[in-house]
Image (spheres, rainbow, N blue to C red):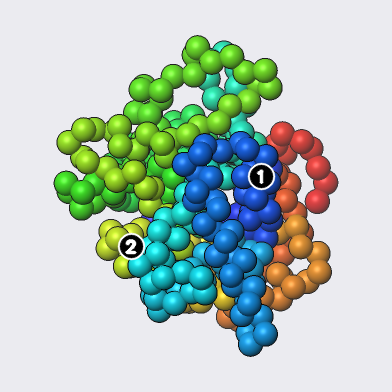
Amino acid sequence: MSKTVFILGAGASKQAGVPLMGEFLDVADSIWKEGKITEEDKEHFERVFRAIGKLQMLHSKSQLDLVNLEAVFSTFEMANLLKKLPGFEPDQLPDLLTSMKRLIVVTIEKTLKYPFSSGHAKEAEPYREFCKLLKDLKDTRNKAPDVSIITFNYDIAIDHALHYHNLGPDYQLQAHAGSENAVNLLKLHGSLNWGISLEHDQIFPFDLKDYFKKYSFRHIISDTNEVTINVSSHLYDQREDLKITGEPVIVPPTWNKSQYHSELTDVWSQAAKELEEAENIFVVGFSLPETDIFFKHLYALGTVGETPLKRFWVFDPDESGEVENRYRILLGPGALARFDYQSLTFEDAIQYIQNKMTGRSGKKARVF
């Protein structure tokens, strides 16, 4: 198990271009209206925004958050379960969920930019510095870095950076064996490069080392020195015998996640084990929404164990005190004694941890 566990939320990929949950749908709407998507995807975007429009009529009797991506996704999931949504027949609701997932995939892949040079996609910022931090935190007695990562993000910015630095990742899925140097990357809500094999009824990640063997950037000319990685469009092309479905594993942020694929429970169980053995827990860019009952229970049950916490540090740009207070309510007395909150971005959080844990400054020397 890892002594240090990083928990990454949407804020960790903000600098790389991925919109936050509260702005995600606005960005998707702009991409759609500016004609930056295919005709097929326009149908998916139109279906999602039509459904959001229909939900406006519920406001006379209830309050729904129709701006936040996760809130809307959860509402669509509940609508499918209840077979009830204004303007949609029950048999149309599974298509709405498919459209929502496609909107998420397209928006992420359109906005997540990777620096490009010498025919290669480089690490998205600030994941380059993050990987350097992971290496610095490595226990020199072990071959593998003594860290693990739990993330709620669908994007592959961290996956690509770990691949680029020969750190894996290891997804802890049956069909994916990481190298001895691999960092455990536990993606609780799925990933753009995860597909389900109909032949094997398993989740098969399209490992990036295999992806780049098939899809090279060497002949691409980029005027902006940036490229996108559209791995979700090639999931079916991993191996012909797998019969991968065209839809990546994207799980809504609701309590009942196991209905999507039982194998995800292995990922969540591993996350609980990592938390149990952690001496240091660093949370970055995860605002702990009040509706996220799943994480609260995962944390409460996962941290049951004999290992005492040395640090529970939270990094989020929020300066209002709201996010800090949510964590103070979550934590027990022992964790509160080790709690530290810093209103920092991911980039600055990396430098803060680097300075405090190793005594060395990173990319930019800052005084904290």
Rendering coords of residue 66 (x, y %):
64, 68
Q: Residue furthest bottom?
A: 61
Judging from the image, what secondary structure is the residue with disc 1 in?
helix
Taking the spot 66% from the left edge, 64% from the top edge, the residue there is: 67
- For the question of whether residue 299 can be seen, the reply is no
Work out whether 311 lies above or below 301: above
| Dot 2 crowding, Cα within 10 Å, few <14, some 14–19, many 20+ | few
Judging from the image, what secondary structure is the residue with disc 2 in?
loop
Which residue corresponds to mark 1?
33
**Depth order, front residue of 211/356:** 211
Q: Nearer the viewer, mark 1 or mark 2?
A: 1
Taking the spot 52% from the left edge, 74% from the top edge, the residue there is: 86
Q: Mark 2 belongs to which amino acid?
A: Tyr
Name the image quarter holding residue 175: top left
**Tag 2 or tag 1, which sits nearer the N-term?**
1
Q: Mark 1 belongs to which amino acid?
A: Lys
**Which label sits on residue 260?**
2
Looking at the image, residue 355 sits to the left or right of residue 202; the answer is right
